[in-house]
Amino acid sequence: MSRYIIKKLFYGGFVLWGVLTLVFFLFQVMPGDPARMMLSQREDSEQLQLLKQKYGFDKPIMHQYFYYLNDVSPISFHDDNEESYTYLSEEKYNDVDILKIQSTNIVLKTPYLRESFAKRGKPVNSILLETFPVTLVLAFTSIVFAIILGIVLGIVSALKKNSILDKSILFFSVLGMSIPSFFSSIIVAWFFAYLLHEYTGLNMTGSLYEVDDYGRGQYMNLNNLILPAFTLGIRPLSVIIQLSRNSMLEVLDMDYIRTATAKGLSKFIVVFKHALRNALNPVVTVVSGWFASLLAGAVFVEYIFAWNGIGKEIVDALNNLDMPVVMGSVMIIATVFVLINILVDVLYAIIDPRIRLN
């Protein structure tokens, strides 16, 4: 299994390289000068040139590309010359020396995602440390809600096959898959936080942490989590309902289930002890994949509900052409995708002994 994981991590590295390369060159063809964005309206040509030199904007595109790969790579090469862009500065890099060849240092470091253009040089690492955990809370809450309710409704739908209840559950699951996230966000916010605000007490916008009215610091407001988590969980909920239903119907029709029923076991024991575990195999795969998708799909939901996560940060960065923030966010999400795909394969092999990882 360890050999398989190492191989998948190696392939995942190529995936990350491809994603970063695509995003980097897309930003190169977009209009706008990042150096001017970082200066105020009083900048002069000398300040502009110094800033371009500091961030490597005065270099050819291919040089900038390799500089960026060197910054985000855990193993990187750095020059002893203080005037060189690749100089090993303590302000930029958190590193451990591996090897030194003449004036070139080879180090192991935390990926350096550079500084935000729009936020006056704030490190992208700091921005992501503030926003990514907030998105993780939203995605985790959404997928837990979708798993619990989806499996329960899927089982009920399978046990009540072709009944009015079964058809109603299927209708709403198809409806949930059909509605885009940005549209469902608007509808949910309008209905529960505007029309029914007097009864629900929920707000149309708000994040996990809010500033105290008296300026005494931040506090956690879990009420703001309810509507975004519900909205983000609608589509995975719909998928899990249908998958659980179809898988449960397939398992209930197997010989060992008939044997267990013929032995006089109660329906509860047959369903939850014998059928459910085998029916959950495909659900585990879908759930794991959806959790990664929720991190990327949270962009519209976070923006509409003003949830200060990585999705809203990406939208703001795109509006400001803030390349380092966008590329850092994309790299984090792509890394999570790669790791979760590996985890899915491992979990599937644990649940189903017939699966062999090679």
Image (cartoon, grey):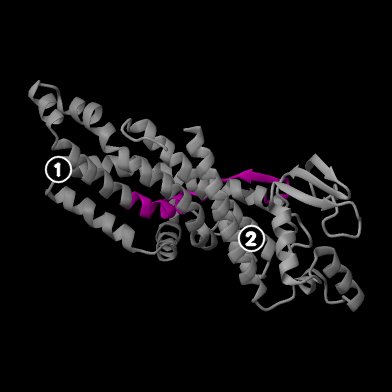
Q: What amino acid is found at the position of numbered circle 2 in the picture?
A: Met
Q: Where is residue 19? Give x, y as percent.
A: 57, 60
Q: Give above or below for 124 relative to 315.
A: above
In this view of the protein, which residue sits in the foreground, 186 or 266? 266
Q: Where is residue 177? Give x, y as percent.
A: 32, 59
Residue at figure coordinates x 82%, y 51% from the top left? 78
Checking the image for residue 327, the label placed there is 2
Q: Can residue 12 be seen in the rendering of this structure?
A: yes
Q: Which residue is mark 1?
A: 160
Upstream in the sequence, badge 2 or badge 1?
Answer: 1
Q: Give above or below for 73 relative to 351.
A: below
Specify whether 8 is left or right of 255: right
Specify whether 78 is left or right of 15: right
Residue at figure coordinates x 13%, y 38% from the top left? 253
Q: Where is residue 288? Give x, y as percent.
A: 42, 44
Are there few (<14), some (14-19), or many (20+) residues within 10 Å of tag 1?
Answer: few
Q: Where is residue 134? Give x, y as percent.
A: 58, 48
Q: Which residues are magenta?
A: 211-238
Task: Check the picture and name the quadrant holding the C terminus.
Answer: top left
Checking the image for residue 87, the label placed there is none
Q: Give above or below for 351 relative to 14.
A: above
Residue at figure coordinates x 45%, y 58% from the top left? 193
Specify whether 253 is left or right of 77: left
- Reply yes or no: does residue 218 show up in magenta: yes
The residue at the far front in this view is 102
Residue at figure coordinates x 64%, y 76% from the top left? 29
Give the secondary structure at mark 2. helix
Give the secondary structure at mark 1. loop
Specify whether 352 is left or right of 193: left
| Image-quadrant location for residue 306 | bottom right
In this view of the protein, which residue sits in the foreground, 148 or 88? 88
Q: What amino acid is found at the position of numbered circle 1 in the picture?
A: Lys
